[in-house]
Amino acid sequence: MTKIAVLGAGKIGEALLSGLLSAGRSAADLLFTERYPQRAVELTETYGVQAADVATAAARSDVLVVAVKPQDIDPLLAELAPVLGDRMAQGGSEVLVVSLCAGLPTALFEARLPEKTAVVRVMPNTPMLVGEAMSVVSGGRYATEEQLDLVEELLGSVGRVRRAPETQQDAVTALSGSGPAYFFYLVEAMIDAGILVGIPRAMAAELIVQSAVGAATMLRGAEGHPVMLREAVTSPAGTTIAAIRELEKHGVRAALLDAIEAARDRSVELGRANDPSIEGDRTD
Ligand SMILES: NC(=O)C1=CN([C@@H]2O[C@H](COP(=O)(O)OP(=O)(O)OC[C@H]3O[C@@H](n4cnc5c(N)ncnc54)[C@H](OP(=O)(O)O)[C@@H]3O)[C@@H](O)[C@H]2O)C=CC1
Ligand SMILES: O=C(O)[C@@H]1CCC=N1
């Protein structure tokens, strides 16, 4: 069985560990690295997965999943490069580096890691926790078809997977990587609206969450025809159109277009900030 190490078990790293375990992968085939010992102890207690240092993780794993914040990539790659170099020098099997980092191009990893290291860039999302991730996979220069298939299989066990050219990854990050946050934000606002119109919080939450689950299930079944689904809810001179008029008046559609464009731009910026060929453009 493929041995996988998650380097940086924060929110998305933990979601991946949890999702892979729920999908039936053995804890013995997983490792993780973490900066703070207390966090490592908590994760081991919760999931039964062992913590390791970067050298051990790199020596024992077939796949290294990088899940640190883009701003933390430099020290991690500086630590990883010599370890992978030693592994190669000792004739060890090839390792595959899978980056989940927003904005960071595969070329960045290829430039900092030993020559010809295979890198795959993935943009997943947190619904991985419940086996409903949307992940988009792009191969770097040295990633083989078999390695891309392997990554698709791993992520396919925790949700849906698509392959796309790396040039689309910043846009993908803005859409599905951050996407769950937009829905959570809408739900939060709708629950507040429930309170405004006199429904207690717990009941408002139940009404809205179940409506979201029902709407999501219908959207999936309808293969993405949101306009027709919305029209079916919108009666002539009814309540829904009164609400839609307000949404349009307040520019909610335009706000979403701007928001997703801003997220795409931020992903591009994170990549540039970590590009050693661009001087004086580091943004945190
Ligand atoms: N959260 C999300 O929805 C998604 C996130 N991503 C990407 O995943 C990556 C991680 O994001 P997220 O999980 O939200 O961030 P978190 O900050 O929750 O997780 C990153 C973890 O990595 C740890 N870490 C940092 N440096 C090292 C190191 N050198 N060795 C070991 N551990 C280290 C951090 O420790 P410490 O707490 O000490 O800093 C932290 O626990 C980012 O690149 C992000 O772009 C991609 C898709 C979705
Ligand atoms: O907000 C972020 O930068 C990360 C990437 C996609 C979702 N969360």
Image (spheres, grey):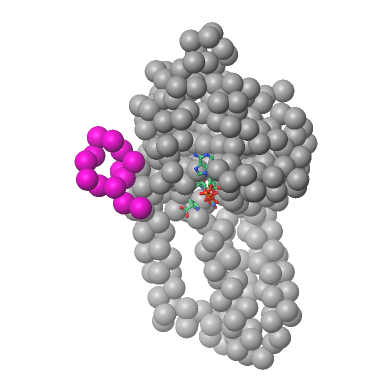
**For this rendering, which residue is in front, 248 or 227?**
248
Looking at this view, name the residue that lies furthest to the front: 37
**For this rendering, which residue is in front, 253 or 207?**
207
Asked whether 1 falls inside the magenta stretch, the response is: no
In the rendered view, tell whether residue 198 sits above or below residue 150: below
Q: Quadrant of residue 192?
A: bottom right
Q: Residue drawn at (60%, 28%), measured in percent from left and top?
A: 57
- Residue interval drawn in magenta: 272-284
**For this rendering, which residue is in front, 21 or 74?**
74
Q: Residue 210: image x %, image y %?
A: 72, 69
Q: Residue drawn at (38%, 49%), measured in percent from left and top?
A: 267
Residue 148 shows in this picture: no
Q: Quadrant of residue 222?
A: bottom right
**Magenta region, main secondary structure:** loop
Residue 95 shows in this picture: yes
Horizontal arrangement in the rendering, residue 33 relative to residue 129 (left or right):
left
Looking at this view, name the residue that lies furthest to the left: 279
Q: Residue drawn at (25%, 35%), measured in percent from left and top?
A: 277
Asked whether 275 falls inside the magenta stretch, the response is: yes
Horizontal arrangement in the rendering, residue 103 relative to residue 148 (left or right):
left
Q: Residue 97: image x %, image y %?
A: 51, 28
Q: Residue 145: image x %, image y %?
A: 53, 21
In the rendered view, tell whether residue 61 sits above or below residue 10: above
Q: Residue drawn at (52%, 32%), measured in percent from left and top?
A: 98
